[in-house]
Amino acid sequence: MRKPFLMIPLLVFISAAAFIPAHAKDDYLRPQEIDDIRDEQDAGKRIILYLSFAQRRLDDVRSSEVSNSRKAGQDIQKSLDEYNSIMGAIDESIADARKQRAMLTKPLEELKAQGTAFLRFLHSLQTDGPNRSDYLFTLEEAIDATQDELNAAKEGPYPELKNRKPPSDLPPAPPPPPKNSGDEGGPPRKKGRTSQQN
């Protein structure tokens, strides 16, 4: 008999969770990062924010590399996993920015520059680093994800415009005007009415 009453708190919790912004549920972001993303409505500018978050994760990887912790490999794995999620968020932001027709030139230039540096560092982890077996698979994913975003940046802000072709069924020149037929073109003039007086 008490089961219906036990369901009420559960339903309240589910209803409340539905109103939490999507980014607030992303456990790969830190509280301040969630706030920063929530405050920035422009999808193009969000790309630059996400790039700064990605840089933080790679800085964490560097710190773990030089630490003497036995968990260094696991810490690198965690940072790379978060980095991969951030790369996915960048991909979504690019798609959103294109839909919004947001200014994308600067964000994509930043993505090219920083993404190239990210990729160089990630490749260095393939040959050096503590306990590589702990994070090798995630590292390969990070390299692929970074390369994908670099390819997206190289497509430019609105790649569909490059593929747009002008219509090919238009005549090469406008039709010639009619020869002296007395027709001035346009609708015929109305004849004036004459009034008759009785």
Image: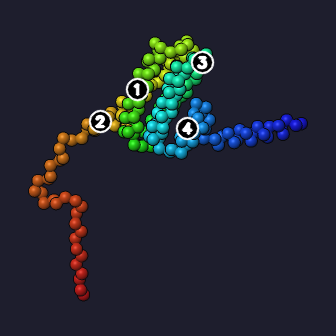
Tell me: residue 157, above or below residue 128.
Answer: below
* Residue type (three-letter) at the residue carrying disc 3: Ser
The part of the image, by quadrant, that contains residue 99 is top left
The residue carrying mark 3 is 69
> Looking at the image, is mark 4 or mark 2 earlier in the sequence?
4
> Looking at the image, is mark 4 or mark 3 earlier in the sequence?
4
The residue carrying mark 2 is 165
> Looking at the image, is mark 4 or mark 1 earlier in the sequence?
4
The part of the image, by quadrant, that contains residue 150 is top left
Q: Which mark is residue 33?
A: 4
> Looking at the image, is mark 2 or mark 1 earlier in the sequence?
1
* Residue type (three-letter) at the residue carrying disc 4: Glu
Look at discs 3 and 1 and give the one toward the viewer. Answer: 3
Q: Is residue 83 visible?
A: no
Colour setup of the view = rainbow
Q: Residue furthest right?
A: 1
Look at discs 2 and 1 and give the one toward the viewer. Answer: 1
Secondary structure of the residue carrying tag 3 is: loop
**Residue at the image position 73 percent from the left and 39 percent from the top:** 13
Look at discs 3 and 2 and give the one toward the viewer. Answer: 3
Tell me: residue 42, above or below residue 185.
Answer: above
Residue 88's x, y, as percent?
A: 50, 29
Q: Which mark is residue 117?
A: 1
* Residue type (three-letter) at the residue carrying disc 2: Lys
Secondary structure of the residue carrying tag 1 is: helix
Label 4, label 1: how many angstroms apart (C-alpha)? Answer: 22 Å
Query: Badges 3 and 1: C-beta atoms under 8 Å apart?
Result: no
Total numbered circles:
4
